Image (cartoon, rainbow, N blue to C red):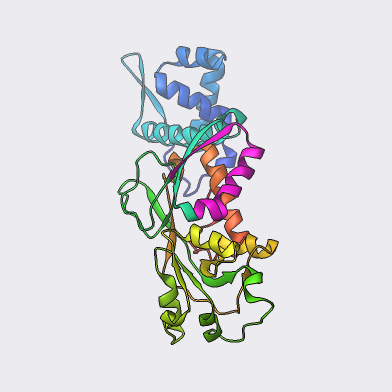
Amino acid sequence: MKHDKSPYIDLRQIPLNALLAFEAAGRHCHLRRAAQEMFVSHSALSRHIKLLEARLNTQLFERKNNKLRLTAAGSRLLSSIQIAFTELNKGLHLLDPTLVAGEIVIGTTATIMLNWLLPVLANVQRQYPEISFKVQTLEPHQQSLPSNLDIALCLGQPEDPVKTITKLYDEYYVPVCNQALLKGKNLQSVKALLNYPLLHDGLGQWFTWFSHHQLDGNDSPQHTYFEYAYQAIEAARLGMGLALADIVEVSEDIQQGKLMQVGDSAHTEGQSVFLVTHDRTQMNYRTQLVLRSILQNLEQKGARLESTAHLNDF
């Protein structure tokens, strides 16, 4: 066997049957058992291995005391091929529609769930009725997450030493209300908003927002306080006042005329939404399906996705 190696070996020049034969023979270290496993003759399997050794210009097996053993090069190749076959099997298994069936556990804030995520899940379930969802509510800025979550959408960065944490987007706040509240008036300035009732959520964004515009939010004639943003947004739909909401959470309301954006002034207050998942290599097919639907929906809503969050990553 020659040992003057080519610096480059083109995988396309190596028959797949030769790799399959080598993997079986290397695993068994016995040509007859490997041939039986592959349903080929002993001589056919030997030809495949000789062809592979010739193409690689490397001896892969040696016989000692009438026993077949891998050479050092053969042992390294066997390990690489088995890793490659494992990954190939994963890819082929993902094509099996039966792998869609099962439960996905999702954790997120009540506001995210009610204002934009629930319609996404409903659409997924219409397309894939085999998928079922279990939803757990997370608090804004909750640090510790339940270990059973397949997907978490968190307001504020959580802590998880095991899973992958990816920043999705920064919230982008805009004033919204039921158009009946303004009685046909076209507000020309941010200051004019102080003539109307303000609807607050637990994060208290209004005062920071007005401060950004060099105004005092306390000058509003009426303040109504809610614990969660979805409650303030629902109150805005009912005409109780102005809510300050992330554009992602109210984009469909604006398109459908349930809410209107007041003016074109917006301000990012530093709130960010984070995605928490298992590493992609440990993620099942149905979870990848749901994640693709979530990211696609966010793009359609105009969310300013971070460069690390790509549809083709899932």
Q: Position of residue 22 (x, y in %)?
A: 48, 26
Q: Nearer the viewer, residue 308 or 188?
A: 188
Span colored in magenta = 112-136
Task: Name which quarter of the figure residue 5 lies in.
Answer: top left
Task: Name which quarter of the figure residue 249 lies in.
Answer: bottom right
Image quarter in which the N terminus is found:
top left
Residue 55 is a magenta residue: no
Q: Residue at x 60, y 79 (%)?
A: 264
Q: Position of residue 39 (x, y in %)?
A: 56, 14
User: Most prominent secondary structure in the magenta stretch?
Assistant: helix
User: Does residue 58 appear in this view?
Assistant: no
| Residue 174 sits above or below residue 63 on the image | below
Q: Position of residue 189 (x, y in %)?
A: 57, 86
Task: Name which quarter of the figure residue 92 lies in.
Answer: top right
Q: Nearer the viewer, residue 164 or 78?
A: 164
Q: How many marks?
A: 0
Q: Position of residue 198 (x, y in %)?
A: 49, 72
| Residue 152 sits above or below residue 156 on the image | above
Horizontal side of residue 159 vs 170, given as left or right: left
Q: Residue at x 54, y 38 (%)?
A: 286
Q: Residue at x 54, y 15 (%)?
A: 43
Q: Residue at x 59, y 39 (%)?
A: 13
Residue 124 is a magenta residue: yes
User: Does residue 151 appear in this view?
Assistant: yes
